[in-house]
Image: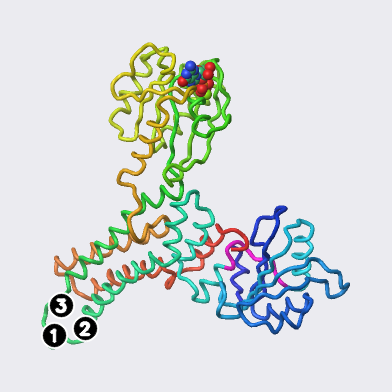
Amino acid sequence: MNKHSYNREDMICALATPMAESALAVIRCSGPGIIEKCASLFKPGKSLAEAAGNTIVYGKILCPETGRVLDEVLASVFRAPRSYTGQDSVEFSCHGSLPGLQAILALFQEQGIRQASPGEFTFRAFLNGKMDLTRAEAVQEIVSAKSSASQSLAMNRLSGAIEKEINRIKDDLLGLIAAVSISLDYPEDEVDDKVVIDSEKLERAGDHIRRLLATYGTGQMYRDGVRLVLTGQTNAGKSSLFNLILREERSIVSDVHGTTRDYLESWISLGGIPVRLFDTAGLRDADNPVEKEGIRRAGEIVDQAHIILYLVDGVRGMTVEDEEFLDKHKEDPFFIPLWNKADLSQKEAPKGFLPLSAVTAEGFETLEKAVSKRLLEGKLPPEGAVIDSLRQKELLEEAADCLVRFREGMEQGMPMDVLSEDLRNALNCLGEITGEVGTEDILDTMFSRFCVGK
Ligand SMILES: Nc1nc2c(ncn2[C@@H]2O[C@H](COP(=O)(O)OP(=O)(O)OP(=O)(O)O)[C@@H](O)[C@H]2O)c(=O)[nH]1
Ligand SMILES: [Mg+2]
């Protein structure tokens, strides 16, 4: 977000739906005085100006100078503080006509309603205390969720799952800080020389932080998707399987060895988990520099894979290269070797291989089940809060380190005034997660990732 948008007292507007031809489109406006301003561009203006909060007014948007009607709309009126941003707001449901929307937005800007920056509505909601930072982050995650399960995890965060968990940890830390402060406030001879630290609280705070941290891997998986990569020698049938999984002819299939050069990528959902599926160049000793580069890239994709499906051409049988690849990856729990072309092959699938035909789809259901099972093994979203933001993870790690330092210092008999710093730093980290403690830089980078209109 641009620095200028830290001004939260001016009037802003944005198209909250895609700039595309559609049945309806929503233009969102917010800021002090926005209802009166919109009423001056609306007929019947008085009805809009006097509308109660949470009501809808039917009317027309018109240019006050020329009287030209730009659209027939429904205006939803929200009065501060009972609105998304906490400010007076109006949301216009317009016809989804591109020229119409452009004309309305141009009129609003002429009339002093500034085009909002990405995330600015949510930014104002945060500044006005409508939500903490973890909920604000969840807003964008909901918008960009790739599967139903990712969306419901983000909904969980939006309803404050992380904030609640963090507040519980903060309570424990505050209790500990209070105990330490008492010892600092009184001269040594008035209190016992040993500060009594509630070790149960300290333990519990550390446990909760570690538990939240442990959800990061799962959270990431639901946010970024699982990288499922098809690899194998040329002509093994990777592109055929890619198309079968997508149920569309996306990748070129041919009996020429080395057909696929650039890798292809597509999103699918398996058991609610978003999956990024990759088709890659077949592995072989290639002379052609373009093919060579394709194979190098395939190697990179394989290195970043969460699940590898390795296809062997069952008609051709195992090659030395296949053996080498299998040897390298066989211990990997997310490695699934496939014996493809089972419809033609006379040879039995070797032990550990799933027989498959990418042409007749024989064995495909078993493969889908095997992949889903591996995806879900130990990766089911835990009840409650799941973090998926690197920012949150790093702050939690820092808080966990502070608590470890505090405990070690205590064991070494370090003075309490030094030790209490660790507790305060841990508390600060948690405060940064929810946004009570923060810098403009964090806000700047965080909200700039949002869509305009959010
Ligand atoms: N009968 C039969 N033919 C298959 C099967 N899978 C693939 N083929 C054929 O094998 C040939 C190669 O298939 P592709 O899917 O292009 O193989 P690939 O692994 O993507 O090959 P490269 O892109 O060259 O690495 C094509 O003629 C496919 O029709 C299968 O399960 N059964
Ligand atoms: Mg191919």
Point 50% across, 49% down: residue = 146
Horizontal side of residue 4 vs 246, given as left or right: right
Horizontal side of residue 370 vs 192, given as left or right: right
Horizontal side of residue 113 vs 348, given as left or right: right
* Residue 42 x %, y %: 77, 75
* Residue count near mark 1 (Cα–Cα under 10 Å), binned few <14, some 14–19, many ≥20: few
At label 1, the amino acid type is Val
Asked if the beta carbon under badge 3 is closer than 8 A to the nearest atom of ligand 1, the reply is no
Q: Quadrant of the C terminus?
A: bottom right
* Residue 229 x %, y %: 44, 33
The residue sitting at the right extreme is: 66
**Residue wearing tag 3:** 195
Point 36% across, 66% down: residue = 429
At label 2, the amino acid type is Ile
CA gap, disc 3 and disc 2: 9 Å
| C-beta proximity under 8 Å, tags 3 and 2 | yes
Asked if the beta carbon under badge 2 is closer than 8 A to the nearest atom of ligand 2, the reply is no
Q: Earlier in the sequence, mark 1 or mark 2?
A: 2
* Residue 31 x %, y %: 64, 76
| C-beta proximity under 8 Å, tags 1 and 2 | yes
**Residue wearing tag 2:** 182
Using the image, determine if residue 30 lies above or below residue 214. below
Q: Is residue 385 magenta?
A: no
Q: Earlier in the sequence, mark 3 or mark 2?
A: 2
Q: Is residue 119 magenta?
A: yes
**Residue wearing tag 1:** 191
* Residue 346 x %, y %: 38, 11
- Residue nearer the viewer, 152 or 407: 152
Span colored in magenta: 113-121
Point 44% across, 22% down: residue = 357
Using the image, determine if residue 249 lies above or below residue 383. above
